[in-house]
Amino acid sequence: MAYSTSAPPRLVTQAVGTAGGSEWQYSSTDSFETVAAADYFSNGSDLGMVVGDIVRVIDTTNNVMTTTVVRAVTAGGAASLKGGLQALTASGAVTEGVDRLTLAHASVVIASTIADLKKWAGKMLVIQNTSASGTAAHTVTITTGTFNGTNKVATLDAPGERLTVLVDHTGNGTIIENTGSVGLSG
């Protein structure tokens, strides 16, 4: 189901005297991954959503609630949330605040970049090679921060490889799980 401006998120608590911090609730049959897509709330600015607002997203199909924050409001008025899934099938930048990143191409290397891992402070980031086959050496390179206090490059070259990283306030990660043989370097 696509977002409809006739069924917007509702303002639950309004912050006074500060930018951000208001609380919203949004119920939909859409999964959190769908709602967390860039510019999902096409009229977010008109509703009064600002960066830093808290949003409770309720997936009524699966009876799951996810709490997140508004990460961006575009000049055109659309609001985007932190979290969700980003699926790359070609090289590109990793969207700030995604919870899961998948890399999928059997024969073409995907080179992705995280500009500043500090934007994930206090959160977990899961990176997975979801290619059906192949040994393309997909990479995720961090410009500022590290995966483990030392390494800035993760290489996933086999289907099913997965790296789970908990990020501290300085933008340095602790590897929680390395499934398969995700290579770390740099």
Image (spheres, rainbow, N blue to C red):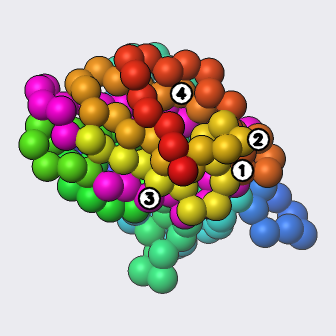
Mark 1 to mark 2: distance in Å? 6 Å
Mark 4 to mark 2: distance in Å? 13 Å
Mark 3 to mark 1: distance in Å? 14 Å
Mark 3 to mark 2: distance in Å? 19 Å
Residue 161, located in which quarter of the rendered image? Answer: top left
Q: Earlier in the sequence, mark 4 or mark 3?
A: 3
Is residue 95 shown left or right of residue 91?
A: right
* Residue type (three-letter) at the residue carrying disc 3: Thr
* Residue 32 visible to an observer of this rendering: no
* Residue 132: x %, y % from top left: 13, 26
* Residue 153 visible to an observer of this rendering: yes
Is residue 40 shown left or right of residue 129?
A: right
Is residue 49 shown left or right of residue 9?
A: right
* Residue type (three-letter) at the residue carrying disc 1: Gly
Judging depth in this view, the residue of 154 and 165 nearest the camera is 154
> Callout 1: few (<14), some (14-19), or many (20+) C-alpha neighbours within 10 Å?
many
Q: Tell me the magenta residue range.
A: 111-136
Residue drawn at (82%, 58%), measured in percent from left and top?
A: 15
* Residue type (three-letter) at the residue carrying disc 4: Thr
User: What label sits on residue 168 in the rendered view?
Assistant: 2
In this figure, which residue is indicated by the disc labeled 1? Answer: 171
Q: Are marks 4 and 2 in contact (CB under 8 Å)?
A: no
Residue drawn at (27%, 33%), measured in percent from left and top?
A: 157
Q: Earlier in the sequence, mark 3 or mark 1?
A: 3
Mark 1 to mark 4: distance in Å? 15 Å
* Residue type (three-letter) at the residue carrying disc 2: Asp
In this figure, which residue is indicated by the disc labeled 4? Answer: 164
In this figure, which residue is indicated by the disc labeled 3? Answer: 113
Q: Are marks 1 and 4 in contact (CB under 8 Å)?
A: no
> Callout 4: few (<14), some (14-19), or many (20+) C-alpha neighbours within 10 Å?
many
Q: Are marks 1 and 2 in contact (CB under 8 Å)?
A: yes
Residue drawn at (25%, 26%), measured in percent from left and top?
A: 158
